[in-house]
Image (spheres, rainbow, N blue to C red):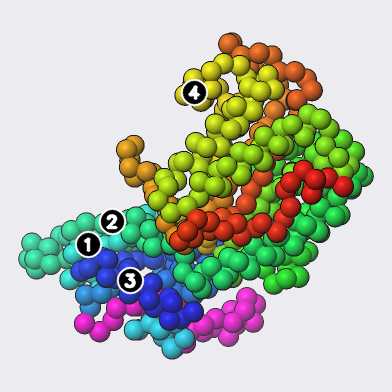
Amino acid sequence: MQAEYRQRREQLMAKIGNAVAIFRSAPTAVMHNDVEYAFRQESDFFYLTGFNEPQAVAVLAPHHPEHQFILFVQPKDREQEVWSGYLCGVDAAKEVYGASVAYPIAELDEKLPQYLEKADRIYYHLGRDRNFNDKILNHWQRLMRTYPKRGTGPIAIEDPGPILHSMRLLKSQAELKLMYQAAEIAVEAHNHAWEFTQPGHYEYEVQAEIEHIFRKRGALGPAYPTIVASGKNSCVLHYIENERKMQDRDLLLIDAGCSYGYYNSDITRTWPVGGKFTPEQKILYEIVLEAQKQAIAQVKPGNPYKQIHDTAVRILTEGLVSVGILKGEIDSLIKEEKYKPFYMHRTGHWLGLDVHDVGVYQHGDDKPQILQPNQVLTVEPGLYIVPDTKPAEDQPEIDPRWIGIGIRIEDDVLVTSTGNEVLTAGVPKEVHEVEK
């Protein structure tokens, strides 16, 4: 992978010209008191370096005559390593990760100015750490004060996201290999969860079965908090308590994916706990399934991204009218967003190093994002007849037989040169497949 990281850096440096780009590693996060969460590297930093430690800074300086890739890292520290694990150290940061030069992180303030003083701008994302933001801004302000005397130095700070994230949006073959593996593991976990599900089990038992397979198959763990939502819990989009005892006539909505090599999968399936849909559950399920199928059919090169969502919304709205939950002319209902009490989220998102991966969905009001080969996205329509939903004045009261039904079906889809490939197709979703 080091050759790929180098290629990414070279591609970014070619795009920023005579500028300097600065990227900071993720901080350690405290769970409680002095106990830390497992470290997870900041995605942009990892994408460019593969370096997986906190307290590090990467600098790209394409204009510098000697050092184009500079790493600032924690030095080797035997006492710290006994407690917290081995550190790469300064020497190995250069040898293993291909840095032109590496310095101890404590020397950042001393060494950084030499890479900034002849750059014409700084690419840096102002993040949540205000102290580090201030550090970069102070360096910039000092150089600006001396600009009239020297005539060189960065005259602007710009976020690297628009450039870097357009790169991350198109997946390389190495990235796709990891995503195929993440999808395969999650497929196995969902299929096992379907076999395990039965009345009397608790939601957390299903969660445990899923996450056991994630780790057993070599995944880092869940890509996000696993959702195992039965009964009316299926109407809560990000339900993660997972405490309820499942009943015979419940639906069970599972939204679970894993992280493999830092790349993520994201699958949702909904099935009947007792093995058979009720008539109402089956009707709404088939509406959502048809919406997903038609939305996936829109995933092909040259189509605007928004066409996926627009297609799903139309099918869902038509379905809601067909069962009497909505009434009116379809186009008007869509324009007035009368479907939103029952379908309140978008139909998907980019997928990659982040579960909700980077990349724009729209370039202004009149310029949609166009789908290209090697983009990966989710397609996940749903319907949620949330208890206590108040219909609009011109809409009918909701028949109680629909209330408490929540359904979502989600797959990970790769845009190919000729259409699409559903990476998670191994989890069944037809009615006859999910019923027992």
> What type is the residue that disc 3 sits on?
Gln
Is residue 74 highlighted in magenta?
yes
Q: Residue at 34% x, 55% y: name it.
A: 162
Nearer the camera: disc 4 or disc 2: 4
Residue behind mark 4: 331
- The magenta stretch is 65-93
Which is nearer the N-term, disc 1 or disc 2? 1
First along the sequence among labels 3 and 2: 3
Q: Are marks 1 and 2 in contact (CB under 8 Å)?
A: yes
Q: Nearer the viewer, mark 1 or mark 3?
A: 3
Q: Which residue is mark 1?
A: 121
Return the residue found at the far front.
Answer: 418
| Pointer 4 or 2: first along the chain | 2
Check residue 158 in the rendering and tell me which mark sits there, or answer none: 2
Question: Mark 3 sits on what residue?
Answer: 11
* Tag shown at residue 411: none
Q: Percent x, y for residue 419? A: 50, 55
Q: Nearer the viewer, mark 1 or mark 4?
A: 4
Task: Please identify the residue farthest to the top as the structure is shown.
Answer: 393
Mark 3 vs mark 4, foreground winner is 4
Which residue type carries mark 2?
Glu
